[in-house]
Amino acid sequence: MAQKPSLLIIGNSNVGKTSITKLLLPNPKDFKGKTGKNPGSTMLIKTISQPNLQYKISDLPGFGYIKGSSRRREEHTKKQLVIHIEKNYSEYFFSLVVINILRIEDELTKYHDSKSNTIPLSYELIQFIKEFKLPILVVINKVDKVSDFHKNRIISLFIEKAKTYNIFLSPLTKIGESGVIIPYIEFSAIKKLNLDILKNIINFHLSKKNK
């Protein structure tokens, strides 16, 4: 029996990766992964597979913003992710880079505005996945936590600053779009906002992999 292809879900700590994983599962109650408010609660690389799911999901640990964690621990986690993806990237048919909209401004201030020689963690993740030519969808999560005005302002800021790092983002308008522009969707794991769109684009890339 052919091995199932894998969906990569990656992002910094406490962006909602595990919550999104559960939304994609046919039987979420059978999933024993950790979710919660504590950043860094998912510390191991987990591969999830269920009989009625046509693909596996790799929910990778986040790094950055882990309260009480040492820099050495964060660097170890980051290295672990790099090694895993370098070794297994050929198994992935699609990747979700999950962003927490509530953290975008702080991240840009810390790594872009205050230190011009550093790169914000979210952009670093996107650049890293791009190196392996994996299709990417940026999932801007927790948009239900901000007003429409602030949501639009923050996302516009995120898109504009990304150009500094040769990352060009655009709203997902057509499933199957490809090229230098990386699509993104606004999302809420709690409200299940755009969940159908997310599932559709995952299935689109899965069908391409299976051809």
Image (cartoon, rainbow, N blue to C red):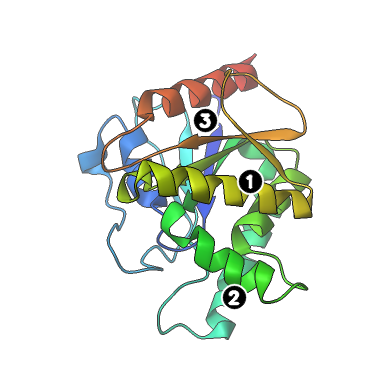
Q: How many marks?
A: 3
Where's the C terminus, which quadrant?
top right
Compared across the picture, whether 112 is left or right of 172 comes to right
- How much space separates mark 2 and mark 3, taking CA atoms? 29 Å
**Residue 8 has which mark?**
none
Q: Is residue 134 above or below residue 42?
A: above
Q: Position of residue 118 (x, y in %)?
A: 72, 71
Residue count near mark 3 (Cα–Cα under 10 Å), binned few <14, some 14–19, many ≥20: some
- The residue nearer to you, when weighing 200 against 104, is 104
Amino acid under disc 2: His
Earlier residue among tags 1 and 3: 3
| Kind of element beneath mark 2 | helix
Q: Is residue 197 above or below residue 126?
A: above
- The residue nearer to you, when weighing 205 against 114, is 114
Q: Is residue 202 above or below residue 83?
A: above
Read off the residue under disc 2.
Answer: 76
**Residue 4 has which mark?**
3
Q: Residue furthest front?
A: 149
Q: Position of residue 52 (x, y in %)?
A: 34, 24
User: In the rendered image, which quarter is residue 119 located in?
Assistant: bottom right
| Kind of element beneath mark 1 | helix
Amino acid under disc 3: Lys
Read off the residue under disc 1.
Answer: 159
Given contact means CB atoms under 8 Å apart, are the residues at marks 2 and 1 in contact? no
Q: Position of residue 49 (x, y in %)?
A: 40, 38
